[in-house]
Amino acid sequence: MSQRIAKLMLPFSVLAENRKEPFTLDMEKAAIYCFAEAEREKGGGLILRKKEEKTVFLTKFCYPFWLAPWNMLSLIFDGLKQSAYIATYKALPDARVFLEKAHMSAKSFETYTAFLSDNLNYFQVPSGERKVSIEGLISETTFLGEFSEYLSKAKQMEPAFSEAVPLNPLVDESLVSTAIEELERLRKDFEAEVATLNESIKLLNKTTRGFTKEIRGKIRAVKAEFEEVIRKEEEIAVQKISRINEEYDKQRAKLIKDFKKQLLPLQKEKV
């Protein structure tokens, strides 16, 4: 984070676009008084009677916020630690271990199919939950949307600024820097995990295509081998059939000739 810190003063309210009447300082004080009056102890109680609280205007205070850039975003931190960002997510099994096993199994079709069978549900079973907690970081969507409108009306605070007293923040620059470093570490971890998953997908696709091509080649080779065997057997069968037909024709011709020889004397006798 930059060592140069700009101090900005945000307005108490942002006027609507169609509002013509200005929002004066007295109106601002009246609005704050209404909020305070709603929380003021009015006294009462039957046994332990409470004293009535009084509202006294001391001075105007400024609530501290930190605005810090990170990865094309602007993060807002609650200077008094009234907010915190807590995220819980499912932890995936180690993608690097999966990738290493995939590399080792890619040497043969048998080990590869065994690897796929053993790791079919590898990523479907989470290895637990992980929790991320960033102290002071504001993530409430409605607030962030409204804050951006206020930020557009912010003014630079001068060194001799005396209009209001800034409250000392509980969140300092080092805490903001630490939070950003933690977010950056998480981002890099997620990106590395996604890169490993993509590498695993590419390896599985490449290995599967390789073994598919190999199997298809074997199928073509077996088919060609059997086609050659069938062709040779067909040639042998054709030759055998040809010889059988020749023998049959010879026998048929001989029988016809013998029959005619036997038939001729009979015809002469009839004559």
Image (tube, rainbow, N blue to C red):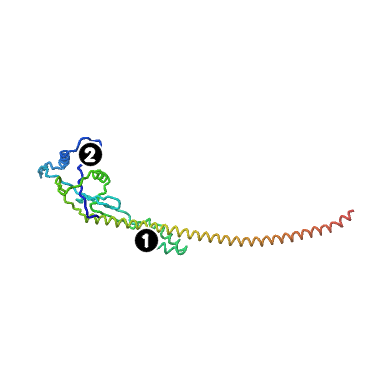
Quadrant of the rendered image containing residue 33:
top left
Quadrant of the rendered image containing residue 133:
bottom left
Asked whether, in this view, residue 136 is left or right of residue 57, the answer is: right
- Closest to the camera, between mark 1 and mark 2, is 2
SS of the residue at dot 2? loop
The N terminus sits in image quarter? bottom left
For marks 1 and 2 on the same chain, the one whose residue lies earlier in the sequence: 2
Q: How would you rate the neighbour count of disc 2 (Cα within 10 Å): few for under 14, some for 14-19, many for 20 or more?
A: some
Which residue has dot 2 on it?
Answer: 15
In the rendering, at what x and y percent does residue 38 appear?
16, 41
Q: Is residue 91 above or below residue 27?
A: below
In the rendering, at what x and y percent does residue 60 appear?
14, 44
SS of the residue at dot 1? helix
Which residue has dot 1 on it?
Answer: 96
Hey, what amino acid is under mark 1?
Arg
Dot label at residue 182: none
